[in-house]
Image: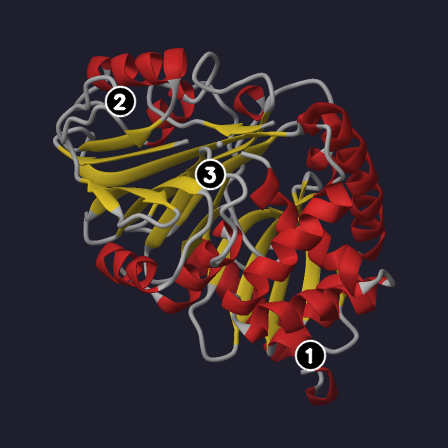
Amino acid sequence: MIKILLSVILSAAVFFPLTAGNPENLTIVKRADNGCGILCTYKQKKRILFLEGSPEQMGQAHGQLLKSDIRLMEAIMLAVAAGYLIEKKDNFFTRIAEVIRRTTPFIPRRFLAECDAVSKAAGITPESGRRMNYFPEMFHCSGAAVCNAATTKGQVVQARVLDYMTDIRLQDHAALMVFMPAGYNNWVSIGFAGFVGTVTAMNEKGLAMGEMGGDGQGRWDGLPMSFLMRRIMEECGTVEEAVDLMKKVPLTCDYYYILSDKHKNMCGVVALAGSPLRLLWPGKPDKLLPPVPQDCVYFSKDDRARVLSRRLHDNFGKIDALRMIEIIKRPVAMDSNLHDAVFLPESLTFYFADADSKTPACFMPYCKLNLRELIEFYRVDKAKQPLEKR
């Protein structure tokens, strides 16, 4: 039910440039009562949630500012449970309780504290809030990164396509989230209301990451994928540091990660629970994949992988963000294409699109934003607020 893909070609997509601090582009809708977050709209089209402070402070702000969406996400869990029963012939709530029990010992306390604070502020039970954050472990997504000779100017371009549950309308509760946790890296997640982990992200150090899910369901004695990715965003600054962290913690299920950083390092990581990591370096052939061009790494499956490989080869040396956006389109992306993103780690610029009720993300207009500018926007606004609101 969850599958993902990524890629490369020329685009006619629509982009909305952001100038930091420009109220015509970014409109503040509401401020958190605790002074640790704001909810904005960008061009009246996209929601951007800014969160800062301790886990409890960020969770409280998150739960308050997206309360109605989080309550609707709780209702979506019931639809997921019904679908799971039909498809798997198994009880969703029994199985996710097992996931929570087996993975919780490996999750940093700060993430659980934040998750529970979100639930409390939104008026749902802690159990419901945790189910929302753990359910990606029960369903299984793709990615590509290119640089040097493969691109127009030698720049790093990383793409991520999430094909995931548009049939239950997750896209209605999408939100771009800028996390500024006390004592850790600032980072951005293309995410959803109530979700404190991430599946698509880049941090202020210029490290970007996406994933593709595989098999291995039931191997849950480790750190769940979405929380692993958050740890990497908050604690690492390079591909090497991210891989080192992944080697040190037990992992769950089977996942395939794409990592890139501003230093032009790129890597594919085959992470199968209970097995050593296998690293795929740019241009390295692999039995899992059709031919891999020089200075490229990617993960995908079946016919989608063959199309991705061909497009990477056909556009070699001409790839930039717009070409990468174009190759994400069908048939590389699936009909269930929930969101897409293209990261430029060297500049901290990124492009993203969400599906709507009828149209996959790859055919929707993209927004172009910059993480550095977003953080500055928040800081400038906070400095303007009275001291008691800071």
Residue closest to the far bottom: 387
Alpha carbons under labels 1 and 2: distance apart: 53 Å
Mark nearer the N terminus (1 vs 2):
2
Disc 1 + disc 2, Cβ < 8 Å = no
Cα separation, mark 3 vs mark 1, equals: 49 Å
Q: Where is residue 180? Give x, y as percent.
A: 53, 69
Residue on which disc 1 sits: 385
Which amino acid type is shown beneath numbered disc 2? Leu
Secondary structure under badge 1? loop
Observer-nearest of 129 and 353: 129
Tell us which disc is closer to us: 2 or 3: 3
User: From the viewer's perspective, is 90 left or right of 6?
Assistant: right
Q: Position of residue 191 (x, y in %)?
A: 60, 47
Badge 3 marks a residue whose secondary structure is loop
Q: What amino acid type should be assigned to the residue bearing mark 1? A: Gln
The mark nearer the N terminus, 2 or 3, is 3
Front residue of 49/72: it is 72
The C terminus appears in which quarter of the rendering?
Answer: bottom right
| Badge number at residue 216 | 3
Quarter of the rendering containing residue 91 = top right
- Residue at image position (52%, 23%) is 362
